[in-house]
């Protein structure tokens, strides 16, 4: 779970809210220590986001293309349809096919759900 920066600082560095409030109102608190706290919270947030991207492939990154994103969405949906037997039965009844034939079709569609990948672009192109 991703956490908000100030909440993260409170939970990691301070035992209770009184200790946190006294830190903020203390006149001896230097600007350097406040900058360190802000940097620490941003760094920890970045680490949590990277962990999320490593754990779940479909979350994407800044370099994820529209085709990759669509492919991940389609594969997740098809896997969910296959995994929930009642939904698979609903589709089988609606399309008048057996569940195994429909399951086989969904599995084959997972190979390239959005068609072949688009041609690679050069670095200067939009």
Image (cartoon, rainbow, N blue to C red):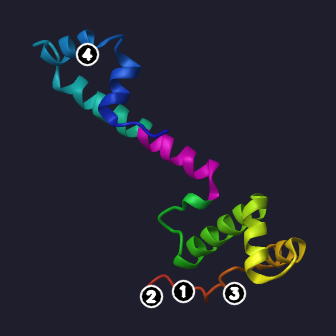
Tell me if residue 39 comes above or below residue 27 in the rendering.
below
- Cα separation between marks 2 and 1: 6 Å
- Cα separation between marks 2 and 3: 20 Å
- Cα separation between marks 3 and 1: 15 Å
Report whether residue 110 is seen.
no
Give the prevailing secondary structure in the magenta stretch: helix
* Residue in the picture at 43% in, 36% down: 44
Secondary structure beneath dot 2 equals loop
Residue designated by label 4: 20
Secondary structure beneath dot 3 equals loop
- Label 2 or label 3, whichever lies nearer to me, is 3
First in sequence, mark 4 or 1: give its number. 4
In what quadrant of the picture does the C terminus appear?
bottom left
Q: Residues within 10 Å of mark 3 (few under 14, many from 20)?
A: few
Secondary structure beneath dot 1 equals loop
Q: 35 left or right of 42? A: left
Give the magenta-colored segment's residue range.
45-57
């Amino acid at each position: 779970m991703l956490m908000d920066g100030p909440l993260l600082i409170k939970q990691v560095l301070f035992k209770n809210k009184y200790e946190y409030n006294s830190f903020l109102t203390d006149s001896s608190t230097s600007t350097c220590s406040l900058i360190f706290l802000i940097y620490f919270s941003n760094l920890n947030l970045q680490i949590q986001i990277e962990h999320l991207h490593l754990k779940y492939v479909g979350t994407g990154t800044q370099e994820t293309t529209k085709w990759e994103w669509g492919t991940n969405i389609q594969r997740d949906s098809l896997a969910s349809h296959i995994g929930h037997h009642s939904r698979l039965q609903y589709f089988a009844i609606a399309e008048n096919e057996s569940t195994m034939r429909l399951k086989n079709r969904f599995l084959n569609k997972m190979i390239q759900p959005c068609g072949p990948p688009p041609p690679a672009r050069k670095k200067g192109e939009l």
